[in-house]
Image (cartoon, rainbow, N blue to C red):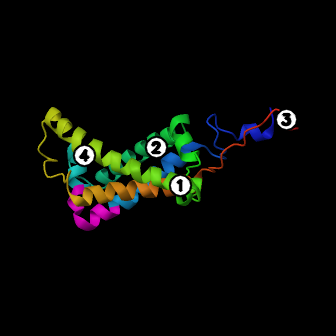
């Protein structure tokens, strides 16, 4: 086994530390950016509503801890998804549109992060959270701004920062396909 193959992930992206680290770090930094934005609009969302989702009292930094843990978990999901062959193939493809073909893989991963943030906003706070709150029967998080513009902008910021950090932490150069005629 060569030294070069030791740094190859199984999906064709060279990396010195791997997608899990890139996803976790990107998710944590993205959650910090999102949390700061929420904190500017309404600090009670982070300090009271997020712990209230789990039936916890708003004490200390519990809301921040939960928010960062959510970001890390979502970052790991993003890292896993973006390095699987179907999505990786889309990111690496050479589109026929001249302006898109000039974009590098880094910009495409950032765009994937933006789309991921939009998907997270559409799925978690809009669909899952209301069902979750009904299931646990708590009123503590009833004021959670699920459909607010701030929530959408925050999730888009999260996804974009996640994509940027993931692209910076993970070396995203696609592996070179070996042909049988090369020595």
Indicate which label's residue lies in the foreground, 1 or 4. 1
Report the front residue among 7 and 97.
97
Say which mark, if any, is on residue 78: 2
Q: Residues within 10 Å of mark 3 (few under 14, many from 20)?
A: few
Of mark 1 and mark 4, the one earlier in the sequence is 1
Of mark 1 and mark 2, the one earlier in the sequence is 2
- Read off the residue under disc 3: 181
* Residue at (73, 38) in percent of width and height: 6
Which quadrant of the view contains residue 34? bottom left
Q: Position of residue 112 (x, y in %)?
A: 46, 50
The stretch in magenta equals 36-45
* Residue at (40, 47) in percent of width and height: 116
Q: Residues within 10 Å of mark 4 (few under 14, many from 20)?
A: some
Q: Please, what is the dominant secondary structure of the magenta stretch?
A: helix
- Read off the residue under disc 4: 125
- Read off the residue under disc 1: 97
């Amino acid at each position: 086994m060569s030294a070069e193959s030791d740094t190859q992930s199984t999906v064709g992206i060279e990396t010195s530390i791997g997608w899990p680290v890139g996803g976790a770090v990107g998710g944590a930094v993205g959650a910090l950016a999102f949390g700061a934005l929420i904190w500017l609009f309404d600090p009670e969302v982070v300090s009271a509503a997020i712990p209230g989702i789990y039936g916890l009292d708003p004490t200390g930094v519990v809301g921040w801890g939960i928010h960062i843990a959510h970001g890390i978990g979502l970052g790991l999901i993003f890292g896993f998804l973006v390095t699987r062959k179907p999505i990786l193939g889309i990111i690496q493809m050479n589109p026929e549109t001249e302006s898109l073909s000039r974009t590098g893989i880094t910009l495409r991963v950032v765009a994937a992060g933006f789309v991921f943030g939009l998907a997270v906003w559409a799925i978690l706070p809009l669909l899952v959270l209301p069902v979750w709150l009904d299931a646990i029967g708590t009123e503590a998080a009833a004021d959670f701004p699920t459909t607010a513009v701030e929530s959408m902008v925050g999730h888009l910021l999260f996804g974009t920062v996640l994509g940027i950090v993931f692209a910076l932490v993970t070396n995203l150069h696609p592996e070179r396909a070996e042909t049988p005629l090369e020595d």
